[in-house]
Amino acid sequence: MKWKERVGLAMAVSVVLLTSVLVLDIRYASSGGRAEQTDAGFILPALRHGTARQKEGRQFQRQFLDKQPAVKEPENPVIPSRTATVNNEELELGVVASNATLNDDDPAAQHSNNEQGSKVDVVRDLLKGKRSQSTNDETYKNAEDDGDLDHLKSQFKDLMKYISPAELSRPVKGNLRELDVTVQRLRNVSLSDDATSWEKFHVSISKEELYHEDDPMIDELLQDMATLEFYNISQKEGGTQLKLVIEFAPGGMAMLKPMRFPREQETLPNHFYFTDYERHNAEIAAFHLDRIMGFRRAPPVVGRLVNMTTELYALATGELLRTFFISPAQNLCFHGKCSYYCDTGHAICGHPDQMEASLAAFLPDKEFVPRKTWRHPWRRSYHKRKKAQWEEDDQYCDQVRQLPPYNEGRRLVDLIDLAIFDFLAGNMDRHHYETLSLFGNQTFPIHLDQGRAFGRAKHDEMSILAPLYQCCLVRRTTLATLLRFHHGPFRLSTLMRKSLARDPLDPILAAGHFVAMDRRVAITLRVIRHCLSRHEADQVIVGLADWKDRFSHTGS
């Protein structure tokens, strides 16, 4: 190559390199000097607009990993129009009121703080996972492990004026006006002498509750589900996890949920609420909790030790039968077919063929007693990255109040009862609910499907209480029941232990869940106290005026 050609080639290469450097320099300047690292490890200047994937990644990082630029916050952060100092331990316990409103023994301080209008919405901070800077995580962890928390010391003297003293020592009864409006009456059904326990249960369902308090028929039904011979089995269609429909020899049906893992095993840290395992013992415990709270809106559930060989494998057919196998440990297993955990790696196995299960009594056939399914207003998004509207909008309840059937009648306060029930059980999986169409819209929502409750004993999911703290509405009888659990001769944990001891599979829950229920009772009372600090009592407590009128006349 001649020297002139070499010089020309060298000049051409130099021009290309210079142009490249200038272009990169311009892009670097336009991006504000930011640089990003590619998957290959090379540092390149960030593009001005970025790619869609880069934007999504940064949004995900900000929203879920909370990796914001380090900004030094003031020692006493101030929320516009709401300023107060919040005790770190109270914040960790889920307290939803200012320090003044938490002080049972200093009403003057409460009044002074209320007049200043300085309140901290601790709920919002809890939902966003914020903690005070001086919070000692290790101290809190130890306090949880010991179960020795200040919630046991709270007196809630300011809430005691809304109940009668007798309600602390006996179950609280609401004003049930239509207990006589039953399926039997509306359908004009007469029972034969040899009626099954299921038939007795179905016709006794009323407009107010699924069964009457202390009705011996419920114990008879529980006994039948725990002991009667299986006549036929089939896998329930739909749903995310395996459930079996059990038909009994004399008639009657139940939903079987099998045991998957020991009671001590909690929800896996990386599991979303919608992919969590369903627990057979959660269904059992939730039925007892619903009964103790006086709702009686959950169908009866009992535990049973099932022989997989004679009671399942011998009756299985078709696709279900083909999923049975003998494991390497020589245990009989099966997995069925469903959306989650229905494969060999997540099989349900006996020891070697004995398996624990819960059995929930079927409700009446829909052709006999129609039911209506409603989308829950506080339904979660069931998405890994998106939030529901109520999680972003503090005024969401105002919209719900304008829509039927929540704009009148009992439905809204019924859902708040349901939220309190779910919070005590730790159940986040409440997307729909059902009512009995036979009774119209002025009837209770049925408490169905609690299989994902009692998953994390040391975590109190405050967002479950959103209907309560967004609407600031609660039944007086529900408040009285919570105060009874907290102050009465027996705490909720004691009542639950006593009730669950009657189940064939006792013990039903690990010890930590009993501690958690007592803690959550106090947290719920603090949420109610917070609402009363913002609104008049008559606006918060449903049935307060009627109770005052009765109490003034009877004095009890």
Image: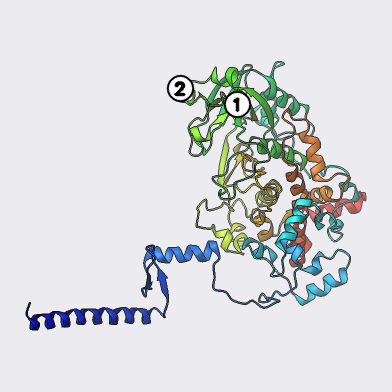
Q: Secondary structure at mark 1?
A: loop
In the displayed structure, does residue 49 sit left or right of residue 318?
Answer: left
Q: CA distance from mark 1 to mark 2?
A: 21 Å
Q: Position of residue 274 (x, y in %)?
A: 55, 46
Q: Nearer the viewer, residue 175 or 328?
A: 328
User: Which residue lies under the disc numbered 1?
Assistant: 350
Q: Amino acid under label 2?
A: Gly
From where the camera sits, is residue 203 visible? no
Q: Which mark is residue 93?
A: none
> The N terminus is located in which quarter?
bottom left
Compared with 356, 420 (above or below) is below
Q: Residue furthest left?
A: 2
Tell me the SS state at disc 2: helix
Compared to residue 172, the image places residue 119 above or below, namely below
Q: Position of residue 490 (x, y in %)?
A: 86, 44
The amino acid beneath tag 1 is Gly
The image quarter in which residue 12 lies: bottom left
For image coordinates 79% across by 72% down, the residue present is 114
Q: Which residue is mark 2?
A: 318
Residue nearer the viewer, 541 or 98: 98
